[in-house]
Amino acid sequence: MRKPSIAVVGAGGMVGRELIELMHKRKLPFSKLEFYGSKEKTLNIKNLKIKIEKTELAKLKDNDIVFFVSSDDVSKKYAKKLSMSGVWCIDDSSAFRMDRDVPLVIPEINSDLINEKNKLIAGPNCTLTPLAVSCYNIHKKFKIKEIRIATYQAVSGAGKRAVDEFLYELESFIKTGRVKIKEKVLPKQIAFNLFPQVGSFDESGNSVEEKKVEAELQKIWGDKDIKISCYAVRVPVLRGHSLAVWIKTKRKWKEKEIIQTLKNTEGVKFFENQNDYKTPLDSQKKYEVYASRFKKTPFENEFSLWLCGDNLYKGAALNSIQIAEIIIERYFKWNLKFA
């Protein structure tokens, strides 16, 4: 049993800050902890004063585990080389999610894919995580064949510049009664508005986000036959993604069977009372995803569900921490409380 040396690439970003906070909150063991970014600087995160160094491959190689919570380009530049040299790399970007040789892991679903054969591990898109976690056991029991999704995605999912733009728009309205746009980070005004675009569109009319949801969910569940239709919508919420989903199964079920499965699913809190539905605010900084407003639809073997999850926690930083906890338990022989 030994403590691993750990590095965080992208430590100064939104997800990086959450990751560092969670590492201390969940008492992740480490012998050394280093922070990297695009340039040197010092930051205060909660009560922690951290020094961020400029990212260099040689420095990263001197670690057991490296978290990547930066851009696709940064992950592509360093992660594969590092993993091939024997360093565990946990990547929160979309760079390797659909790489056939890289496991795409949500620990509640497929932690068995974490092994020494491939030390590069990808984390999922934050939007699909509440659905992937909450309905995986239903899929195993009743074989889901069709999913229709409408997402309600927080501005923080688009990064800090988008959040700053949202807050500027709100502030300008409070001061002048009119919404001003400082720089066009998002495709449309987001204050007092919403729009059905998350990423650019392809020739078939799907946005980047909609394609990610379909492809990644099929990979995580290990089933390419599931038909998925998604509308991804950006909403004026700071933190927490929500989804309305319609799930159609091959096998018949009774309502109490679906409800009991949801209640017994790891990583999910299910609320049966229709009036006790949950919102993005309820899910902030929570470890679980929230499922509520279950109802049977008029269509055969179909039900609908309302899902919420913190896109910066379980959709990003927390999922990466959980992967690290499993690595530390299995390969560094620690018995961790949260793993």
Image (spheres, helix red, strand yellow):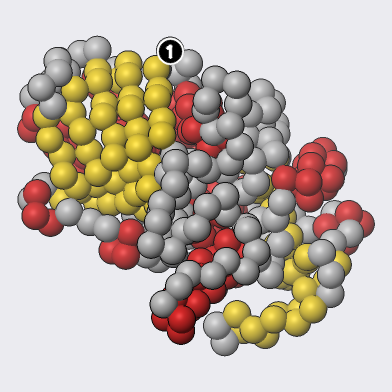
Residue drawn at x 60%, y 80% is: 45
Mark 1 packing: few (<14 Cα in 10 Å), some, or many (20+)?
few
- Front residue of 335/216: it is 216
Residue at numbered disc 1: 225
> Which residue sits at x=82%, y=64%?
38
Rendered location of residue 31, percent (x, y): 70, 69
**221 with respect to 45 (left or right):** left
Q: Residue 118 vs residue 231: left or right?
A: right
Say which quarter of the image contains residue 317: bottom right
Confirm whether residue 32 shows in the render.
yes
Q: Secondary structure at mark 1?
A: loop
| Residue 121 seen anywhere in this rendered image of the structure | no
Residue 279, image x, y percentages: 27, 58
Say which of 206 and 14 sits in front. 206
Q: Residue at x 32, y 19 (%)?
A: 146
Q: Which residue occupies the foreground of this view, 148 or 100?
A: 148
Residue closest to the far right: 58
Type of the residue with mark 1 = Asp
Q: Position of residue 62 (x, y in %)?
A: 84, 59
Q: Is residue 227 above or below residue 330?
A: above
Q: Quadrant of the N terminus?
A: bottom right
